[in-house]
Amino acid sequence: MRIRPTSRRPLLFAAALLATLAATWWASSLDEEAEVVSGPARGGTPAATPRRVSAPPGGMLAVRRAPWPEAGATLMQSPPPPPVAVEMPPPEAEIPPLPFRFIGALGEQGRRSVILLEGKEVRIVRAGERIDANYRVDRITPTRVEFTHLPTRQRQALDIADHEAQP
């Protein structure tokens, strides 16, 4: 009977398996002493001296290793992220106090103007007008005049309710 080439492959695998099992059985039955040699230590220090270890009674060779160093426990961990610099917003510029004093009001409610005193200069302004390059009049109500300090873009208000109540 002729064996086809494709059926030889399982026979070769079976023979290799039997050879491996036989070698394993033979190695486990050895009762000789085994020599264990440590490799060179880290950092270039000389290697440990060889020592002889005899096989345990069960026929298997048991080799004990030194415990892992504590530094080895973190070998596979990723490094911590770098610290993140948090940008603090710039400190708000201090707004100077309003240089205006309320003198009086003109006109009706819809077209109201106010008379302001700045130092020795008298100004008559309406809502939406600019006073020099520093202030803009945003709104005029019966109780207050609202300004925006243009360099810092912050709002300020001048109360006028007390002035209008006087006769």
Image (spheres, rainbow, N blue to C red):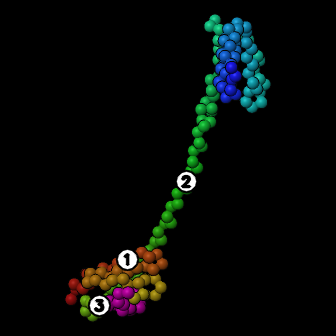
- Label drawn at residue 92: none
Front residue of 165 and 90: 90
For disc 3, the marked residue is: 112
Q: Give, as a three-letter code, the residue at label 1.
A: Gln
Considering every residue shown, the one lying at the far bottom of the view is 107
Dot in front, 3 or 1: 3
What residue is shown at x 48% (from left), y 78% (from top)?
Answer: 151
Query: Is residue 123 one of those drawn in magenta?
Result: yes
Measured in 3D between alpha carbons, the distance from the residue under mark 3 to the one under mark 1, in whole angstroms, is 19 Å
Q: Earlier in the sequence, mark 3 or mark 1?
A: 3
Locate residue 98 relative to residue 4 in the image: left or right: left
For disc 2, the marked residue is: 84
Q: Specify start and end residues of the magenta stretch as a single range.
A: 113-128
Front residue of 95 and 63: 63
Front residue of 157 and 50: 50
- For the residues bearing labels 1 and 2, Cβ distance under 8 angstroms: no
Q: Main secondary structure of the magenta part?
A: strand
What residue is shown at x 78% (from left), y 25% (from top)?
Answer: 46
Q: Earlier in the sequence, mark 2 or mark 3?
A: 2
Dot in front, 2 or 3: 2
Q: Circle 3: is it few (<14), some (14-19), or many (20+) Cα within 10 Å? A: some
Could you tell me which secondary element the residue under label 3 belongs to?
Answer: loop
Q: Position of residue 95 (x, y in %)?
A: 44, 74
Q: Is residue 35 above or below residue 127?
A: above
Measured in 3D between alpha carbons, the distance from the residue under mark 1 to the one under mark 2, in whole angstroms, is 37 Å
Q: Is residue 111 above or below residue 31?
A: below
